[in-house]
Image (tube, helix red, strand yellow):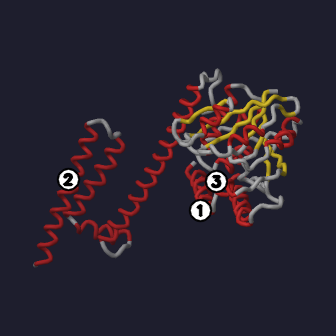
Amino acid sequence: METSKQLVILQAVAAIFALFALSRVYLRFAERKLSSLSFVFWVAIWVGGVIFILFPDITTRFAKLVGIGRGVDVVIYASIAILFYLIFRIYIKIEDTQKQITEVARKMALHENGQKEPAKTARR
Amino acid sequence: MKALVVIPAFNEEKKIADVLRGIPARVNSAELDVLVINDGSNDGTDKVVRDLGVKMINHPVNRGLGAALGTGFEYARRQDYDLLVTLDADGQHDPSEIDRLVEPVTGGRADFVVGTRIFKKGMPLTRKILTLMASLATFSLSGVWTTDSQSGFRAFSRRAIENIFVEVDRMEVSSDFFRQANENNLKIVEIEITPIYTEYSKRKGQNFLNSFNIIGKLAFRRLIK
């Protein structure tokens, strides 16, 4: 009985956190700081989280479906995959940002030097 | 023929004056213009260069070797240069060898000349191993075999200037030149040069750790493109 009570508390805390995260996602979207696609992605993540927290049996059923023993394992595997994907995206974003900083530094350097934009445009 | 020597410099106040003074006023039939790309140095590099009356472009912040060379290429394109020479600011290249280096370009036999350092006596063993590793990495990523892919002593033809757009910011630019040269069907020629290894240039050079970093970065770029 004791363990099931603990589980309920844990579920409540986790669900509240997920709902809080969901509210942040919505606010970011309302502020137009999140694209529609990102909004859908994050809502799916956190709504999925809430469902899994409140109805853990679903994960077990899903686990059996894909041939993994326990529901918890499915959630962990999925989480790792999602984390890797997000890190990859951040890496790409940083690369892009670095490229833009170089572009700005170059423009400033050449501009300071009195260099005009070339008549024929650069390849990219 | 308009010729430009580009020298990327980051904190090179100790050596750059000697390098600049050693550059000949002209090679073959071309007068040599000199341009220092001061890559956000925070020592007295800019003052040394200015005092010598050499043309200089300043990156507001440090962006790395590749970024500095990219700015040099952009400048050469805008100013309509026919020949571009790159030279390290740390004094490891002998500027009097520029005429030998550019000869294949002025003779119409090459678009991209690399001054290779290997086979010469006095190259430290660790540097030899590193050079070989870099060559292997460059080959696997660009399909071009070179004895010294990381050499900073290079000459480019007008065709090369117009076709090479540097997209990488740091040391990986050296290998990337080969990839772009290969993709644009540029003629590559290697010329042996005499490197000057001092304690200073050794310290400034690449080490094992960042050579792995370079390989990783280039491989990753290839993967995601």
Say which amino acid is labelled 3: Lys
User: How far is mark 3 from mark 1, CA to CA?
Assistant: 14 Å
Q: Is residue B35 above or below residue B148?
A: above
- Quadrant where the image shows the N terminus of chain B: top right
Kindly state the secondary structure of the residue where label 1 is placed.
Answer: helix
Q: Chain of mark 1?
A: B
Quadrant for residue B137, please give it.
bottom right
Q: Which residue is mark 2?
A: A19
Q: Position of residue A41 (x, y in %)?
A: 34, 49
Circles 3, 1 touching at the beta carbon (< 8 Å): no
Considering depth in this image, is A23 or B69 the residue closer to the camera? B69
Indicate which disc residue B81 carries: none
Q: Position of residue B182 (x, y in %)?
A: 74, 46
Identify the residue at horizontal 51%, vertical 33% (top origin). Answer: A104
Identify the residue at horizontal 71%, vertical 36% (top origin). Answer: B163
Quadrant for residue B219, please give it.
bottom right
Left/right of residue A116 with respect to residue A25 in the rendered view: right
Left/right of residue B51 with respect to residue B123 in the rendered view: left
Circles 1, 2 touching at the beta carbon (< 8 Å): no
